[in-house]
Amino acid sequence: NAGVTQTPKFRVLKTGQSMTLLCAQDMNHEYMYWYRQDPGMGLRLIHYSVGEGTTAKGEVPDGYNVSRLKKQNFLLGLESAAPSQTSVYFCASRKGVEAFFGQGTRLTVV
Amino acid sequence: GESVGLHLPTLSVQEGDNSIINCAYSNSASDYFIWYKQESGKGPQFIIDIRSNMDKRQGQRVTVLLNKTVKHLSLQIAATQPGDSAVYFCAERNDYKLSFGAGTTVTVRA
């Protein structure tokens, strides 16, 4: 049982480049989330989804887009990366109260 | 801004002692409060949750206390072990959202 898998694990981008982070879960969970984690700031919610085909904005959505075309996948896109988007990104999924997190993607924008 | 926060960013505990980690929240509409543990280089892991209509819940070596009068949540860890060294986050669930505080780093001294 893989749980929540994030790809890639590490990435370095140049300012202005675009990329997509993939989150895949095999637990048939309805709810999926994207967070960013910065030192001293905990986890901040970027976007979330309550089911296939749905997305909603979280606390810090600017500069990011998401898609949930399939129930098991939740994609996070950066159209034009900025140094302020340097962070560790975590995806999570849940059905009940307990959320399951991926191992994170460390993104550096130079 | 964030509605969930922690009182202290760091806590140093002697091995074998009990640990108490505190959290203040501001959103009275949240239906669940949850504690997560994050070890270095990993995603957060669920520890225990408490529903908003309860004031105490016990797990294996952990107890969560909820005081709705002062909007305070705490996690007590009995007989702290080296493996308890991690960052601890409180989180609250409100509708579909999961919001996290900044975290407390717990260091266990041998």
Image (spheres, rainbow, N blue to C red):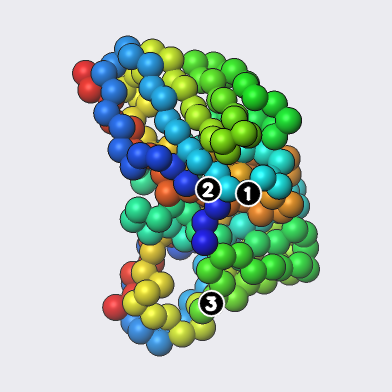
Residue under the image location 61 percent in, 65 percent down: A58
Front of the two marks 3 and 1: 1
Contact (Cβ within 8 Å) of mark 1 with mark 2:
yes
Q: Which residue is painted at 51% across and 20% down in the image?
A: B62
Q: B97 or A35, which is in the foreground?
A: B97
Residue B3 x %, y %: 55, 52
Label 2 crowding class (10 Å Cα cut-off): few <14, some 14-19, many 20+? many
Residue to which mark 3 is pinned: A62
Which amino acid, mark 2? Val
Q: Which mark is residue B27?
A: 1
Helix, strand or loop for disc 3: loop
Which residue ends up furthest to the front in the rendered image?
B69
**Of residues B65 and A86, the one drawn nearer to the viewer in this rendering:** B65
- Is residue B69 shown above or below A83? above
x, y (%) of residue B53? 73, 30
Residue A61, how many percent across, how many down? Answer: 56, 72
Q: Find disc 2 in the rendering and name its residue.
A: B4
Instruction: Give the residue type at disc 1.
Output: Asn
Residue A47 lies in what quarter of the image?
A: bottom right
Which chain letter goes with mark 2? Answer: B
